[in-house]
Amino acid sequence: MVKNSFISVISKEENRGSVEFQVFSFTNKIRKLTSHLELHRKDYLAQRGLLKTLGKRQRLIAYLSKKNRVRYKELIVQLNIREPKTR
């Protein structure tokens, strides 16, 4: 499974509360909810959960980009996420 291999890469020091691990967890949740919503278009509670999760992930990514730009770039490439637009 992809999750187990990525967990071993990210959590070498067993830090499951790190920003990278949280972003990874949110990304997995977003992908699951997206595939669910493709089948069930009118599941509005799932849509709300997806939007909340996207917001949480976006805030964590913004924090990481301000804190450490190198770790941010590595994470974006590793998870294949587009960079958020800056205003």
Image (cartoon, grey):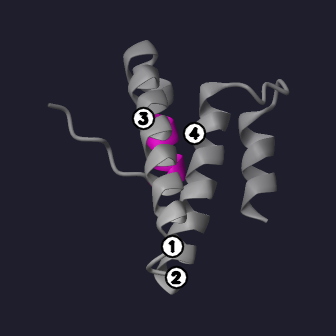
Task: Give residue 73's mark.
Answer: 3
Q: Which badge, 2 or 3, is on the more N-terminal residue? A: 2
Residue in the foreground of this view, choosing between 71 and 52: 52
**Magenta segment:** 73-80
Residue in the foreground of this view, choosing between 58 and 9: 58
Q: Which badge, 4 or 2, is on the more N-terminal residue? A: 4
Task: Give residue 23's mark.
Answer: 4
Give amino acid for label 4.
Val
Q: CA distance from mark 1 to mark 3?
A: 34 Å
Q: Residue furthest bottom?
A: 39
Q: Where does label 1 land, which residue? A: 43
Tell me where residue 7 appears, x and y as whole percent.
Answer: 77, 44
Question: Residue visible at 49% across and 29% down?
Answer: 60
The answer to whether 87 is drawn above or below residue 84 in the figure is: above
Kindly state the secondary structure of the residue where label 1 is placed: loop
Q: Where does label 2 land, which residue? A: 40
Kindly state the secondary structure of the residue where label 2 is placed: loop
Judge the density around disc 1: few (<14), some (14-19), many (≥20) Cα neighbours within 10 Å.
Answer: few
Q: CA distance from mark 4 to mark 2?
A: 25 Å
Question: Residue visible at 56% across and 65% down?
Answer: 33
- Kindly indicate whether the residue at mark 2 contacts the one at mark 1 (C-beta within 8 angstroms): yes
Give amino acid for label 3.
Lys
Quadrant in which the N terminus appears: bottom right
